[in-house]
Image (tube, grey):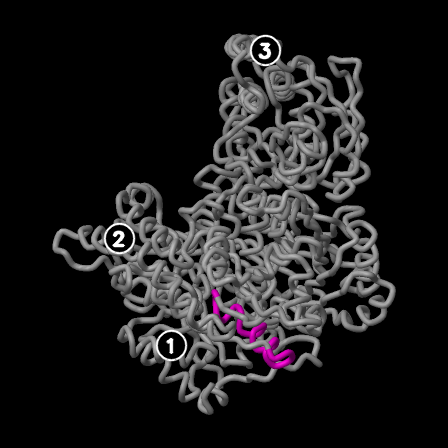
């Protein structure tokens, strides 16, 4: 960590407060930008990156409803209470099914049961308050599920009516066996969905993580989020296993105990740096657990570097070189074959161009990975950006050169415009792009989701490199789906939208 | 133009619940707007409200993407605290203007979430500024004001009050209400089936949703001779308002009709109300029955040799439960065990729903009917039953076999395990689709 960066982000994690600062305040986070990476890092350095309103905006996610509402409920021996109106928890209706598709043979426990409830805030509650109702819900959760932890997820409504969540928690905790963990994820608090990650980790660090009784020298914390699949876990488990290390995968589908023992680990390693950031810093600050944020294990070179970082903290420097060498012997020929296949796709022999729709964490790892596969990135479309990745992005630009960085959180009209303007051979869509997938050229997804157990879905580690390469080649073998829909269905936007050059056409003037 | 009345939630909907099988009023109005083809919903809410309903209403309603105007395509004012301080009205004004400019719509529907209600935005006043530019309806549906079902009703009431004008009655025209988009999983296929079935007897049914000129369908609502409500409680307030404002009477049928017997009943009832030629109606019924039952003959062996006269249970909204239970009981010889009604109907409609489930069944078996919205209690209630089949939601899928010893078929919200595009259990041949799915859960070499 350099002096320079220290002034760019608020590094101190203050667990005496009820929640984290917003990403906007902690690291000058923004989610509106269209320009080059050089311009982006330049402005970020000068402190003049500004988040501005849009006059046209589309629904995109909030601190609660993008990530937390579909993920916190997968913690296996916990219960979640939404202190919210009904709609805030609707996204959680898949809770019983989410991991059931993973065969027990692949390591999914046979017996587990997930739980959530809503306090179902009504008009009456808005007028009279509903803290007592939340208290009842905690008692009811305890009676029904005997959970080890109860996560309370707050909402715009509970926040607006001024519910004293911490007051209630202090009052009822002594009589409650489960550890109660309030998470402040009121949607209106922040423009950035990543604030929700920090809010969650704040609660975990403050209420759940225990003082280490012993150090587990072979334990590596790996915070894995929904865009990393079961196969990614298996691959990470495999390669860490080769070094005699164990992965502590949190928070999704973990046990409460796995969260409690985070401070006993030898190191916290990222697979998405800005997802893990708050937790990593918190564990370091409070318990001295070392961490690193770059790189993620995606692509062969990144995976090598990731393993070496871990090895430094676990005394495996010698073993790691042997493991890397052996892995290369297996996987490098496969990478070579993929590069050759991809090089043959275009008749003129030029590189296949690709547009990835990425989180800012993926931005850092995926661009070198595309390069390794022999693909050319026309841009890196990014959900949001903050100073947490500034230095790493600067290094990346040095390494791969400049590239455009359109930044928006699932703004489907902007994404459709950008995709058409840049016209890559292959657009890697995240599902939340509206009709941007209707096009003439290549299309597939950027990543699989959550509990996908098929080897085909992997992206992490060495096996994931090969799997993802093959996956991309496969997508280039047919364009019929996106072409047919482009031909036969209407576009969501009027033609003028594509005829004018600016995807940020609706950017509002700066507030004085 | 009357201001749409503030909507209050259903009775008893304010308790603590595990995984209730519906979303909020905002979600219901949003879903109805998405289901009105040609309409562009405009969400005046936090940024996550729409995506939450993409996951929790559209995906949950049969794994459906948002289409050209739903999900992340939907304009949203994406309010944060800054806006809450100054009020969200300017943000909404900019959004309506840009939405009209960018997205071609016949109708723009402003759906209001919790935050603008809490900060007191005057949504109607802002919308008014644009009424000379495009048809706009505003629906006041803070999430805390009710369920998806309330939102459906609020949407229709807003349309009736703010948009509709009297039109001359058209002979042979009916409205069909009560089938709630996404909550009723098979809304697309079944509304089309209902329309086609009525067409066979010369009745033009306006089913509103899924027709491409949605705005015109809405405007035609006052033209009908009769509104047919296919639910014991959904669509009733809207139908009553149509009667009150435009003199269109309404008649209630307990559910979407499944199979020949229910469908014939519905046709006869409507024919009587409209004074249709009885001979023509009976000829259609006879021809349709003949063809449907010819197919039923083909399932005879797999039915009789393997699982004849099975007990079955139902965990579903009242609309799905009634139609499916009556078909299986009255036509297939199945025996109903436990029925758990999950859509939280108002107290004063529960007797009618129970009646529709237990009266005049073609068996001496009487199902036990419970009204339950809490997923934990639903699960307790189902334990220890001996049903061979469970018609329920995808919530039951992972636990049905190991906990209840029953084969699950997803027929009710939520349905994350079934992609439902055009599937229909409605009409004369709808029962065939249902039987294909039920028998396919156990079919093997005979």
CA–CA distance between discs 2 and 3?
70 Å
**Of the numbered discs in the image, which one, if any, rests on residue B278?**
3
Disc 2 crowd, CA 10 A, few/some/many (<14, 14-19, 20+): many
Specify whether disc 1 shares its chain with disc 2: yes
CA–CA distance between discs 3 and 1?
77 Å
Indicate the quadrant where residue B331 lies: top right
- Subunit under mark 2: A
- Subunit under mark 1: A
Tell me which residue sits at (62%, 46%) in the image: A109
Q: Which residue is identified by label 1?
A: A393
CA–CA distance between discs 1 and 2?
27 Å
Indicate the quadrant where residue A123 lies: bottom right
* Numbered disc in front, either 3 or 1: 1
Specify whether disc 2 shares its chain with disc 3: no
* Element type where label 2 sits in the image: helix
On the picture, is A506 further left or further right than A453?
A: left
Near-viewer residue (B24 or A273): A273
- Lower sequence index among marks 1 and 2: 2
**Magenta part of the protein: which range?**
A271-288
Tell me which residue sits at (34%, 49%) in the image: A471
* Element type where label 1 sits in the image: helix
Near-viewer residue (B325 or A476): A476
Q: How far from the left and from the top, in percent, is residue A465?
A: 36, 56
Q: Is residue A277 magenta?
A: yes
Disc 1 crowd, CA 10 A, few/some/many (<14, 14-19, 20+): some
On the picture, is B317 further left or further right than A415?
A: right
Q: How far from the left and from the top, in percent, is residue A245?
A: 53, 63
Look at the image and tell me whether residue B342 can be seen: yes
Query: How many circles with numbers are drawn on the protein?
Result: 3
**Of the numbered discs in the image, which one, if any, rests on residue A338?**
2
């Amino acid at each position: 960590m350099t002096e320079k960066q220290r002034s760019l982000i608020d590094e101190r994690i203050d667990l005496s407060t009820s929640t984290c600062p917003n990403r906007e305040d902690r690291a000058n986070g923004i989610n509106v930008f269209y320009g080059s990476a050089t311009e982006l890092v330049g402005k970020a350095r000068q402190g003049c990156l500004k988040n501005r309103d849009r006059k046209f905006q589309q629904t995109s996610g909030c601190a609660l409803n993008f990530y937390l509402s579909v993920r916190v409920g997968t913690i296996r021996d916990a219960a979640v209470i939404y202190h919210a109106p009904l709609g805030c928890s609707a996204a959680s209706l898949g809770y019983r099914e989410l991991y059931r598709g993973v065969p027990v043979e692949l390591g999914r426990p046979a017996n587990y049961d997930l739980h959530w409830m809503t306090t179902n805030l009504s008009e009456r509650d808005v007028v009279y308050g509903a803290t007592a109702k939340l208290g009842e819900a905690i008692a009811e959760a305890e009676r029904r599920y005997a959970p080890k932890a109860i996560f309370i997820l707050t909402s715009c409504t509970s926040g607006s009516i001024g519910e004293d969540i911490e007051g209630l928690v202090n009052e009822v905790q002594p009589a409650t066996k489960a550890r109660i963990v309030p998470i402040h994820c009121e949607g209106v608090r922040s423009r950035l969905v990543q604030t929700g990650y920090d809010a969650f980790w704040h609660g975990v660090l403050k209420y759940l993580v225990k003082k280490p009784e012993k150090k587990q020298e072979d334990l590596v914390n790996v915070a894995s989020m929904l865009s990393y699949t079961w196969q990614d876990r298996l691959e990470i488990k495999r390669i860490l296993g080769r070094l005699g290390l164990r992965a502590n995968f949190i928070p999704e589908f973990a046990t409460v105990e796995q969260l409690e023992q985070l401070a006993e680990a030898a190191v916290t390693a990222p697979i998405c740096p800005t997802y893990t950031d708050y937790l990593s810093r918190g564990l370091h600050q409070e318990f001295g657990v070392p961490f690193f944020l770059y790189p993620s294990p995606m692509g062969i070179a990144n995976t090598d570097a990731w393993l070496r970082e871990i090895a430094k903290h676990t005394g495996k420097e010698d073993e790691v070189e042997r493991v890397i060498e052996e892995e290369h012997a297996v996987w490098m020929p496969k990478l070579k074959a993929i590069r050759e296949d991809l090089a043959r796709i275009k008749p003129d022999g030029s590189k296949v161009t690709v547009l990835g729709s990425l989180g800012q964490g993926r931005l850092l790892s995926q661009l070198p990975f595309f390069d390794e596969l022999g693909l050319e990135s026309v841009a890196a479309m990014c959900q949001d950006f903050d100073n947490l990745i500034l230095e790493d992005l600067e290094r990346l630009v040095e390494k791969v050169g400049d590239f455009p960085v359109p930044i928006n959180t699932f703004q489907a009209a902007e994404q459709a415009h950008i995709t058409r303007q840049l016209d890559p051979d292959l657009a890697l869509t995240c599902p939340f792009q509206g009709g941007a997938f209707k096009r003439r050229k290549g299309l597939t997804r950027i990543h699989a989701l959550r509990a996908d157990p098929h080897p085909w879905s992997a992206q992490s580690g060495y096996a994931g490199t090969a799997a993802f390469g093959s996956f991309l080649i496969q997508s280039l073998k047919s364009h019929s789906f996106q072409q047919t829909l482009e031909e036969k269905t209407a576009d969501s936007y009027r033609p003028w939208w594509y005829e004018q050059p600016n995807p940020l056409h609706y950017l509002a003037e700066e507030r004085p | 133009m009357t201001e749409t009345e503030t909507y209050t939630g259903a009775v008893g909907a304010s308790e603590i619940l595990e995984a209730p099988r519906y979303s909020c009023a905002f979600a219901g109005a949003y879903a109805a707007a998405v289901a009105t083809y040609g309409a562009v919903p405009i969400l005046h809410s936090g940024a996550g409200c729409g995506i939450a309903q993409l996951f929790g209403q559209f995906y949950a309603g049969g794994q459906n993407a948002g289409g050209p105007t739903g999900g992340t395509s939907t304009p949203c004012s994406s309010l944060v605290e800054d806006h809450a301080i100054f009020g969200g009205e300017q943000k909404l004004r900019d959004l309506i203007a840009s939405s009209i400019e960018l997205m071609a719509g016949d109708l723009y529907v402003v759906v209001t979430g919790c935050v603008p209600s809490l900060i007191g935005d005057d949504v109607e006043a802002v919308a008014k500024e644009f009424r000379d530019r495009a048809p706009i309806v505003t629906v006041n549906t803070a999430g805390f004001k009710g369920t998806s079902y309330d939102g459906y009703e609020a949407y229709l009431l807003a349309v009736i009050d703010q948009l509709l004008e009297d039109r001359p009655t058209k002979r042979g025209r009916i409205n069909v209400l009560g089938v709630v988009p996404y909550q009723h999983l098979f809304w697309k296929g079944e509304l089309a089936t209902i329309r086609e079935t009525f067409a066979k007897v010369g009745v033009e049914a306006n089913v509103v949703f899924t027709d491409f000129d949605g705005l015109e369908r809405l405007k035609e609502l006052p033209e009908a001779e009769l509104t047919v409500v296919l639910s014991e409680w959904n669509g009733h307030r809207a139908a009553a308002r149509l009667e009150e404002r435009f003199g269109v009477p309404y008649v209630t049928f307990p559910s979407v009709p499944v199979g020949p017997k229910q469908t014939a009943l519905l046709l006869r009832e409507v024919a009587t109300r409209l004074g249709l030629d009885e001979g023509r109606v009976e000829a259609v019924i006879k021809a349709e029955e003949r063809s449907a039952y010819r197919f039923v003959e083909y399932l005879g062996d797999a039915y009789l040799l393997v699982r004849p006269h099975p007990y079955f249970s139902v965990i579903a909204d009242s609309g799905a439960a009634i139609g499916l239970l009556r078909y299986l009981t009255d036509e297939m010889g199945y025996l109903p065990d436990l029925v758990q009604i999950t859509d939280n109907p108002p107290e004063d409609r529960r007797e009618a729903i129970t009646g529709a489930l237990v009266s005049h069944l073609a068996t001496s078996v009487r199902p036990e009917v419970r009204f339950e919205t809490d997923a934990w209690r639903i699960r307790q209630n189902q334990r220890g039953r001996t049903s061979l089949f469970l018609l329920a939601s995808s919530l039951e899928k992972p636990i049905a076999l190991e906990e209840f010893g029953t084969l699950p078929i997803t027929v009710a919200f939520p349905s994350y395990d079934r992609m439902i595009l055009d599937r229909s259990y409605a009409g004369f041949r709808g029962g065939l689709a249902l039987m294909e799915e039920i028998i396919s859960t156990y079919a093997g070499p005979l």
